[in-house]
Amino acid sequence: MLAGVGLGTVVLAPEVLAFPHRQIIGDTVVYSERALPATMPQLLAQSDALLRKSAIFGPGYGRRIFLTEGGWRWRALAFQASGAFALSRGFGETIVVNRSDAARDVVFNGGAIAGQRSLSGVIAHERTHGLIRTRYGVAADVVYAAWLREGYCDLVAGGGSLSDRDAALLKAEHRSVPALRYYDGRKRVEAALRANGGSVDALFAGASKVD
């Protein structure tokens, strides 16, 4: 019982893991394991600029961001998603990021293939999950298919960790890596939006079953 209480506390309030650095930037609170660079406000502004291009942009996305070094804090917070770049949770709309270097605007997931992408893009991706939950319901993460949710988030973020060329090479070699699922989801979302005139609401209304 005590273990369950402790786990729930960590999920709801990752700050209990004693992140040594904390900075308030506008209405966002950033916690980190290393000192934040002077360019952190510009990085968040770049991320928000991506987010504002979304047709479903509005209040309600994650405003507490936890930047880790990919060590024990990340493992404690990520659970079974330790190979991800980041994750967001509807409880409190928190965002937790894998090993990151804010000064270089980069995040690493430890993968040998497609193992890094921009931190600003990753934050935009995770904040888009918050937009989806705000607009389509707190259960959106279980109601809607992964290809739709992840594909739309990557579209808003300006792309994922694979270029068209890299994805084509992996497919030609019949290699299966997690990044391909995100890439294919984004391409599927792009095609669906072209077909329906660009309506995000119609996209989600027409794909409400997990597949």
Image (spheres, rainbow, N blue to C red):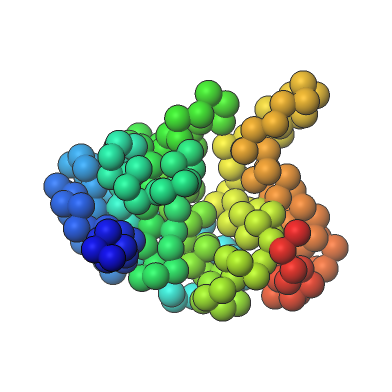
Answer left or right for 198 relative to 116: right
Name, please, the residue furthest toward the front: 1
Query: In the image, is residue 11 above or below residue 78?
Result: below
Quadrant of the rendering where the C terminus is positioned:
bottom right
Q: Residue 116: x and y, percent?
A: 48, 33
Evaluate whether residue 34 shows in this view: yes
Residue 199 quadrant: bottom right
Residue at 61%, 54% in the rendered image = 150
Evaluate whether residue 61 shows in this view: no
Query: In the image, is residue 40 above or below residue 57?
Result: above
Residue 110 quadrant: top left
Q: Which of the two residues, 178 or 49, is positioned nearer the viewer here? A: 178
Q: Which of the two residues, 159 or 85, is positioned nearer the viewer here? A: 85
Q: Residue 95: x and y, percent?
A: 38, 57
Answer left or right for 178 relative to 129: right
Residue at 14%, 47% in the rendered image = 20
Q: How many marks?
A: 0
Q: Residue 206: x and y, percent?
A: 79, 72
Quadrant of the rendering where the N terminus is positioned:
bottom left
Residue at 49%, 43% in the rendered image = 84
Name, please, the residue furthest toward the top: 173
Q: Which of the two residues, 75 or 153, is positioned nearer the viewer here? A: 75
Query: In the image, is residue 131 above or below residue 84?
Result: below
Q: Residue 195: x and y, percent?
A: 85, 63
